[in-house]
Image (tube, rainbow, N blue to C red):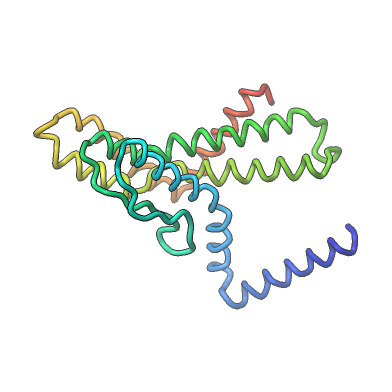
Amino acid sequence: MNPGGTCVLAAVVAVTALAAVVLGFEALLGLLLRLLAAPGVVVHELAHEAACRLVGVPVLEVKYFGLGDPPGYVRHGQPDRYRESFVISVAPFLVNTVVAFGCFVGLATIVAGVDGIGDAPRSTVAAAAVLGWLGLAIGTQAFPSTGDARTLWNRSRAEWRRSPSVLVGVPIVAVIYLANLLSRLWADVAYAAALFVAAAWTVGLG
C-alpha cells in the first residue's frame, strides 16, 4: 500500500475508534448499518412515490432517507380504490427486487469474466464491490413495511362487505407481517442472497 493509502486507512481507523468511544459500539454499528442500507431505503420510497403517481394518488411529502425512525416515508392522499392502495403498498417489493437482481446480474457477470479477484484490475474489483453493496442494500429493503400491511388490512376490513374481492389481499397482508417478523432472523438478507443466487444462475456462474 502506498503512503497516501496508509494515511487514509489510519484516518478512517482513528475516526471509527473515536466514534465508537463517543457513540458506543452498538450505536455506531446501528449507524453504519443504516448508512449501508441507504440505497435500498431510497429505492423503496421512490417505488412508493412512483406508484402513487402511476395510480393518480397525490403525493404530499417524501423523505427518501434519514437517520430517524422511520428512515424514509411517503405521505400521500387517500386512494379511492382498494387496488390503488394495493399497488402503492407492494410496489417496493417489485421495484427493489428488479433493481437488486439487476445489480447482482452485473456483479455475477463481472465475476464470471475474471480468472480471479486477485488478478482483476482495481476498477473491476471496485465495480464488483459497488454492485454487490447496492444489490444487498436494495434487496434487503424489498419487503413492504408493517405500515404498508396495516394500510391494506384497514382497507380490507372497511371494504370487504361491499367488495368481497378485497379479501384476496388478506393473505398478502399476512405474508408482509410474517416477512417483517422474520427480518429479525435475517430473512431480508436471505432474500437478497437468493436474488444473487438467481442472478448467478442466470449468467451461468457456478
Residue 200, percent from left and from top: 64, 28
Residue 50 at what x, y percent from top left?
A: 41, 41
Tell me what residue is drawn at x 41 percent, y 62 percent: 69
Name of the residue lying farthest toward the left: 161
Foreground residue among 52 and 190: 52
Residue 195 pos. (x, y %): 55, 33
Q: Is residue 12 above or below residue 112?
A: below
Q: In the rendered image, which quarter contains the C terminus?
A: top right
| Picture mark count | 0
Residue that appears at 34% across and 40% down: 88
Residue 179 is left or right of residue 15, and the answer is: left
The quarter holding residue 5 reads: bottom right
Say which quarter of the image contains residue 57.
top left
**Nearer the observer, 45 or 56:** 56
* Image side of residue 95 versus residue 134, left or right: left
Residue under the image location 55 percent in, 37 percent down: 100
Q: Residue at x 73, y 68 (%)?
A: 13
Q: Residue furthest right?
A: 2
* Vertical placement of residue 123 versus 33, above or below: above
Give x and y (percent) for residue 138: 53, 43
Q: Quadrant of residue 113?
A: top right
Q: Quadrant of the N terminus?
A: bottom right
